[in-house]
Image (tube, rainbow, N blue to C red):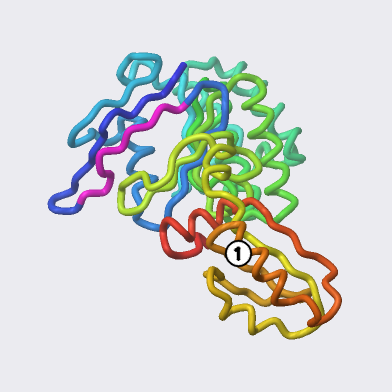
Amino acid sequence: MVLQLENVTKQFGKNIAVDDLSLEIPEKELFGFLGGNGAGKTTSFRMILNLLDPTDGKISWNGKSIKYDISHFIGYLPEERGLYPKLKVKEQLVYLGKLRGMTAHQASVELEKWLDRFNISHYLNKKVEELSKGNQQKIQFISAVIHQPELLILDEPFSGLDPINVEMLKEAVLDLKDAGTSIVFSSHQMDHVEKMCENVCILQQGKAVVKGNLREIKRSYGKKKLIIHMDESMDFIKNIDGVVGFQSTVNGCELQIRDEEVSQEVLQQIRGQGIVRKFEIEEPSLNDIFIEKVGASYE
């Protein structure tokens, strides 16, 4: 089922949160949403979920409007966590599963499977407030997937997690995708989006400034990142025409260059200055593209 946003705008008074956004999000894959605070990501998610009405435009899933009668096909992990701290894990998630059309038995079976996967089976009868923030995040994630949704929307799913739990959750997300779930997610961790997503959209002030297949986007930007490893000072490189960014590293420096031809001028300039252990042109990272289009790093 393809998720489509056609010329979607959302306005709050004079403030335009989402501005004429058009996207086609393919089924059974991971789609990454990026943008700084206030870019319009969460507002877009809420409109997809029919929690907010667009001021203009149309949102459809498999050609149909998203209404309450198909909400059980959708899972949502909001950025603001919404668990009941005084309720026990089992009673809370079984209740949420029943709201999504499951029987108590079905919800219990699915819950125990997920708790076992996340190594937290012993928290089944614990109150949510007794859990660490990381384990609360796992419970919140389970609440979004317990009913086996066909479309899953994850708003900052990895925030507040240590590296081990991030990897655990990433693996679960990828397994859901491989099983056929269509997943849309935002993350402040650019490398996660870069490694996990085939298609992305970068929002700035409600507008899509970059969208499409990540591999094709990177290819269109050309090879503009130059990595040099050598011991001698390379500050003089900053003044070479076509070098638009310079960052010192432990082993040397990383440059942003206007185009590949500039790399040959840089190579000529550093010859005879010392031993060059590495001289490599790379495709721009997603963070490089974000900086170029938005003007600042995401993190």
The stretch drawn in magenta includes residue 268 = no
Left or right of 294? Residue 279 is right
Residue under label 1? 262
| Kind of element beneath mark 1 | helix
Residue displayed at 35% across by 14% down: 63
Q: Amino acid at mark 1?
A: Val
Residue displayed at 57% across by 43% down: 219
The correct choice, above or below, for 11 with respect to 239 in the image is: above
- Tell me the crowding category of disc 1: few under 14, some 14 to 19, or many 20 or more residues within 10 angstroms, Cα based: some
Residue displayed at 70% across by 73% down: 253
Q: Nearer the viewer, residue 291 or 107?
A: 291
Span of residues in magenta: 16-25
So how many labels did they put on this image? 1
Q: Is residue 143 visible?
A: no
Residue displayed at 53% across by 25% down: 182
What secondary structure prevails in the magenta region? strand
Q: Position of residue 5 (x, y in %)?
A: 33, 29
